[in-house]
Image: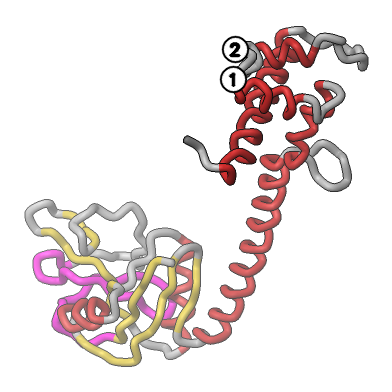
Amino acid sequence: MLSHSSRPNIQTMLKFLMLLQLALEVSLQGTSKSSTPPQDWLQNACTLIMCASNKGDPRREMAIQGLQQFSSPSELLALSAPNRDKLGTGTSELELLKLQMKELRIQMDILKATFIKVQQAILVPNGRIVGEKIFKRDGSKGDFQAATTICAHMNSKLALPRNVAENSALHEIVAFRNEQAILGITYNTAKKKFEDLNGHPLQFFNWAPGEPNNLGYEKCVEMHPNGQWHNRICELGWSIICEVDI
């Protein structure tokens, strides 16, 4: 047996069921513009809930009492009022949520732009942000093996520009100290092509005139202060610049 405290919940459920049915009836009736509710709306709604039960059934009386609180279907449909804004414009909760999400995206874009400006100020002159990548000069020097190890310890990898914008950003770091930097590139003798550290062929190059050469033993690549690439032996010491995706 249901406790007395559970009865308000039952009435609420009955009202909700009636609301769903009435909404369905409205949609089936088409686009009727009449504002006058049918006189038998209470009887019809009651029939679809529990009013058709035996007259001795207490659920029947409960349903009737719940229906009698409303003078028309439109008043019953007002139960769905929470899906309308306070201005009465009829904007649904979903539409309001979409507007809020759009505003949030705008604020996030502003925040991201501000963050990038701050990061740029902090990184210069030893680092740059370009696209979704950060180049950062480690401050130490080493050969190819040492450079890859140092970058890996910082959860990054040896810098490798993959387009003109990235090459320009890395060029600015190298040019500031007028030094050469080792790139994350090696020559695959078997395939006779330069690859990145994952063994993928390169799609972008910025070779200096006459480069690459001496491919038999110059298997690493350095960037000069002018931004151009030269292949060199891998045992030289270079400025180490790492990259990390953001």
In the picture provided, is 95 more to the left or to the right than 210? right
Q: Amino acid at mark 2?
A: Asn
Residue 224 located within the stretch drawn in magenta: yes
Q: Is residue 87 above or below residue 115?
A: above
Q: Position of residue 114 (x, y in %)?
A: 63, 73
Local crowd at mark 1 within 10 Å, few (<14), some, or many (≥20)?
A: few
Local crowd at mark 2 within 10 Å, few (<14), some, or many (≥20)?
A: few
Q: Amino acid at mark 1?
A: Asp
- Give the quadrant of the C terminus: bottom left
Can you identify the residue that label 2 sits on?
54
In the picture provided, is 26 more to the left or to the right than 182? right
**Who's the residue at 14% across and 64% down the image?**
215
Q: Position of residue 206 (x, y in %)?
A: 37, 63
**Who's the residue at 29% across and 80% down the image?**
154
Q: Which residues are magenta?
A: 214-238
Q: Are marks 1 and 2 in contact (CB under 8 Å)?
A: yes
- Residue 241: image tag: none
Q: Is residue 177 above or below residue 26?
A: below
* Residue 190 falls in image quadrant: bottom left
**Who's the residue at 87% across and 10% down the image?**
39
Q: Position of residue 185 (x, y in %)?
A: 24, 66
- Helix or strand or loop: what does disc 1 sit on? loop
- Helix or strand or loop: what does disc 2 sit on? loop
Q: Position of residue 23 (x, y in %)?
A: 71, 20
What kind of secondary structure does the magenta stretch mostly adopt?
loop
Residue 142 located within the stretch drawn in magenta: no
**216 or 175, nearer to the observer:** 175
What sort of colour scheme is used for the picture? secondary structure
Q: How many marks?
A: 2
Can you identify the residue that label 1 sits on?
57
